[in-house]
Structures are given as structure tokens and as C-alpha cells.
Image: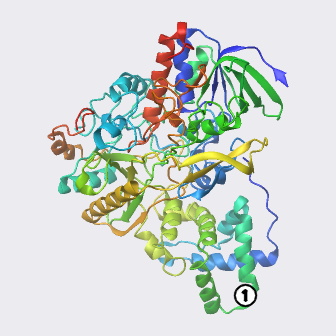
Amino acid sequence: MSRHEMVDVLIIGAGASGAAVAWSLTDTRMRILCLEQGDWVKSSDLPANGRDWEARRYTDFDIHPNRRARPADYPINEDNSVMKVANFNGVGGGTILWTAHFPRMHPSDFRVRSLDGVADDWPISYWDLEPYFEQNDRFIGVSGLPGDPGVPPRHPPMPPLPLGRTGTLYAKTMNRLGWHWWPSDSAIASTEYDGRAKCINLGHCTPGCAQGAKASADITYWPAALRAGVELRTQCRVREITLNAQGMANGAIYFDADGKEHFQPAEMVILACNGIGTPRLLLNSASARFPRGLANSSDLVGRNLMLHPWPQIRGHVEEELDGDRGPMNVIWSKEFYETDRARGFVRGYTMQFGRTTGLVNEAITSAAAGILPWGRDHHKTYRGLVNRRLIIGIACEDLPEEHNRVTLDPELKDSHGIPAPRIDYTISENTARMMEHGIARATEVLEAAGARNIYTSRTLLNSPGHLLGTCRMGNDPERSVVNAWGRSHDVRNLFIVDGSIWVTSGGVNPTSTIQALALYIADQMKRRLANLFDDD
Amino acid sequence: MEDLKPAPFNLQERAIFRRLLGIMIPSDPEMALPCANDPLILEDCMTSLGRDAPAIRIIVSELGRSGFLDLPDDQAEERAMAMLSENRAKVQVLSRVVAAAYYRDDRVMLAYGREPRPPFPKGHTLVQGDWTLLDVVKQRNPFWRHDHEA
């Protein structure tokens, strides 16, 4: 096994959180190395460059790793889960395959026990993160409009993306119903920003942005981090975090692109592998000192998996709308975000109103829904569907339950022979009631908009799958894996910065909060450099 | 990632697939739309099967065992439509393959008012829409919940 020179900081994972923490820690002048199991994605390789761009959403740019099955992907046993996993393994991580919807969690999301008597409060508040939300918005470039009465004040540095025909119809309808709406915050450049070109409406943003208008971590934090001296080693899959005789992390063993094993020593280790990859790595790092998995004295590593149930309600109207000629993100509604016990559940959801995808996807999804027949009536029906679809997503808050968890599959392994994760996940009763409430409200919106063919996908393959909660943060070492600033309770030079440390999920897309949290933890580390590994 | 190269369809499999495509998406004189078994579209389908080839081959084999090629047109159509209404998982794979090739054909894209090109680098135009609709929402007082509220 090759042994490398010692680094001060070893970051594992080059996605949204790993990139942000790497960039932030460059202030310290420490020697920082990041190991990433995937590779860079060249903009010329993204689907929007080709005529087959829609088909590639179902193959090498599918958000579902088991279907995508690139060499960098590891298999996940999802047989006992009603939802599937969304991720991408490469520089930029999930921000490569991402709609760039960029809402923040709300203040109430951090206090669900105090406010609503469910789950647990976070050990930090929205206000602790607020400066980092703002810093992150400015750094990566967020388009939006200040003044939304449904969320705390924020200051997106670019104007919102156009409403378009689709957004205008949604807005008229929501006004008629008297319900809140606002243009969505999007990590998509609506103007030129920091050397990046503005959005030119390539279509659905999920399978990567060939224009570079979408603020994926590979073109935002990583160039800045690399310029500041961070080393990023790609196609390096970490097998195990290692410990010294004192029980401190002292590095990691990884496989390179040729399958050769290496040992990388480090003074501290930061995990940024997402809510599946991080617990998988900790569980694979079991030792005599930590027989249940590294940093797992609480037995909570892998537990409390939250996947964000996200029903989608669709319908078609008579008038021609934007179709795929613009980003998916249009407007959001916070009308049903905060708890109202009269609804029969606690917590709430964001309604997200979308444009749709192209000609191919319209045919595929409408045929799957039984709306578009094959055979003699195909063309007649299709003409009434294409560019006429409305789609509302219900971003439900998913509350933590310990039986929803990540474990190691006893048989399934990745291409390096490393045990693969298995997930067990069910939707809670509270969330199920929330989903049905959201579906009913979205149906009202679509009916008021004049839609027909209204149908719902409660859980669907190409839908998140956000990966949260499996190494939760907290002040009590018996009830959490890391402390209030991301440090393992058990191993004092081991940190976690990804979505696994979330205590609850909120009812929003997580990337904004994941990155703000990573920047917050990096700042906490910088403030404590002299005594970073001391007892709390 | 390179898709695994599937074994090519033999002549009979190809003939079955061709007949099936012709039933799934017939031509449309009104919009001058080709049939899905048009030679160019069929070829695109065949060359882009990739990882879906085994699933498609199963469908084709099942049809073949029912004598699909020997049936008169009306019975072949009946048989194909029955298959398309069953086997949902397999049919979804088939739908994906056929729709992907059909709806990126130049003639089809032009018929639906789309330039036959990839999205990048030209992109599309998106109108701003009516921002005055937001005026009424701006009148609302903030209603997000403070974290100290009971």
C-alpha cells in the first residue's frame, strides 16, 4: 500500500458541502486534500450538447445511481424503501444533477420540539446560519427577489428568473385562490455573475448546465479552492477511516483509479459524502475500539434517514406554455409551510411550481401515467399535451425516525469490494397526512388553472431522494453523532459537514442549508484552531 | 460511461420490433408525422437500445412466440395493444426507447415547432411574464413563523 505525505486536513467528498468547507478553510493556510470517488464532469460531456439530451436523463445522467451505474457509482440496496436515492458521484456531487432550487430552511425548522412537540430541536438556530446563507448566496450567485412575506429577509444578488407563460398562469391562479406565491430562489445566474454566463434556457437544469449558469460546486467553490492551494484527487474511493492508538483519526485508506490501495495520513478528517455515503464509510470503519462503526457510540450512525417525500401533481391546460424552454424552477408557495394543527398534521410543506421537460419526456411520462395512448390515438392526444403541462411538487418535511436507516448490506459490494449501503425507509403517518393535504391543495390549484388529466405521483423514481439525518448533530453524545459544530463526539479530530448531520429535514430543497452549515462549521473550526481537538 | 454493447437483433427480432413500432406510433398525415418504424427512426432506436436491449428483447421474444409476424394487421395490432396495456415495467422501458428516438427526429421536432438541434449553445427564449401579478402578494404582512413562537 502506498503511503502519502501527511496533510493537515483530509476532506472526503467534493460535493456541495466538501467544496464549501475546502474553500472556507483555505484561510487557515493549512495543507488541505480532498479525495473524491468520481471525476470532473466536462461541460462538453453534458447532455444539453446533444440531440439525445432527454434520453440521457435515463442513462448516464439519471439521478438514480443504481440506474445510472457509472464507474464512480456504488450500488444501493433500496428494496426495503418506498423511495429511491438521488445522488451524483463526481466533483460537484449532487449539484451536477440538480434543479438548483435554492430555498433556505425556515427558523421554525430548527425548533420543532419546542414549537410542535415532535422530533428534536437543532443545537443551532436559523440565526446562527443566517450570515452563512447570505455569504453562500453571494459566493455562488443566487437569483431571486427580496421581500417575500413567507420567508425571513434575504438578499439574492441577482434578479429572479423570468415567470414565463407558465409562471404567469400559476400566479394568476394563486392570486385567484388568495394563496401566497413568490418567484423561487434559484442557484442559476439570471445575469452574468462572477465570470459565469447567464442562463439561456437550455431546458430542464437537472442533467447539468452546459452554459455554466447553474451554480454547481465544480464551477463555484472548487475553482476558488484550487486557486488557494487545495489539492483535489479524483477517482479515489475511500474504504476506511483509520485511527491511531489514542483513538484519533489519522487518515484514510483509499483505492485509486487503477484499484491500487493507498494510505493518506491526516491530522484531521472531514466527511462530506452525503447522508448515505457518510454513514456507509463510518460503518465500514468499524474497529475493536468502535465495533458498531466509527464514531457510533450512540448507535445513531445511519439512523433517522430522511428522504423528503415529494409528491408531484400534474395536469394539462389548453393554452401553450413554456414547455421545456426554461429552467424547471418558477415559483414557490409557503402558504402551508408552518404548522396548523387543524390540518391533521404538524409541520408543513412548500409547494413548488415547475415548468416541464421536452418532447421526449412528455411522451414518456404521459404514457406511463396512462394519459397518452400508443396506437391510433397517439398523435391526437399528444398534440393536446405537449407544452401544456403544469407540475406542482409538494416538498414535505420528513421527520426523523430511528427505524429509517442506512446499514451495510451483507452481500452487495461496490466495484472495489467495499460493502454497499442498504436503506430501510417508510413514510411516517404524519408525513403521509401532510402529503395528502398537499396533493389536495395542488389539485385545487390545477383545477382552478383549468387543467385536465390531473394525476399524482406520490413517490417516483426520478424525484428526491434527498439524503439527510443519518449522523445527526446535537449536544448530547447519547442522542447525536456530532456536536453543534460538526465534530464527532467520539473522535475529536473527525468532522462531518454534509446533510447527514441534519436533525430534521424542513420542507425545502436542502442544498442552500447544507452549504450554509458547511461554511458555519468551517468558521467554528477556524475560531477554535488553537484548541480544536480539546474536550467540549 | 459506455453502455454495454448488446448482441444485435437478428432479422426476425428486428422484423418484430419494426412491426411493433409501426403499431405504437403510426404516421399522421395531418401533421406529416412519420411512423415510428420509419427507417431513420427505427435505426436510431436500434442503435440506442444500450442497457435497455435485454428488456426490449424479452418483449420481442414474447411477441415472437405468439406468432406476431404471421398475424393479419388487425390481429397484430390487437396483440400489440394488449401487450402494451400489460407488463407495465417492461412497457415503460419500451416507451422510453421508442419516445426518445421518435421525438428527436428532425421531422417530428419541426412538426412541433422545434428546431432540430440540441439545446446548447443556442438555448431558448423565455418571456418575462406578468410581474404585476406579484403586487397583491407584496401587500401581505410577513407570515413566516418565528422560532420563539409557541
Report which residue position mark 1 lands on: B66
In the image, taking residue A341 as reference, residue B10 lies left or right, namely right
- The vertical placement of A7 against A315, above or below, is above
- Answer few, some or many: residues within 10 Å of disc 1's Cα (few below 14, many 20 plus, some between 14 and 19): few
Quarter of the image for residue B150 reads top left
Q: Chain ID for label 1?
A: B
Q: Which residue is drawn at 39% across and 35% down?
A: A190
Q: Which residue is drawn at 28% across and 55% down?
A: A169
- Front residue of this view, candidates A203 and A242: A242
The percent coordinates of residue A489 (x first, y second) are: 55, 25
Kindly identify the amino acid type of the residue bearing the numbered disc 1.
Ser
Q: How is the image coloured?
A: rainbow
* Secondary element at image label 1: loop
- The vertical placement of B95 against A312, above or below, is below
Quarter of the image for residue A36 reads top right
The percent coordinates of residue B127 (x first, y second) are: 33, 46
- Front residue of this view, candidates A519 and B49: A519
Q: Which residue is drawn at 40% across and 22% down?
A: A135
The percent coordinates of residue A379 (x first, y second) are: 48, 74
Q: Quadrant of the N terminus of chain A?
A: top right
On the question of residue A464 being in view, the answer is: yes
In the image, taking residue A104 as reference, residue A517 lies left or right, namely right
- The vertical placement of B96 against B18, above or below, is above
- Front residue of this view, candidates A82 and B117: A82
The percent coordinates of residue B142 (x first, y second) are: 19, 37
Give the number of callouts.
Answer: 1
On the question of residue A198 being in view, the answer is: no
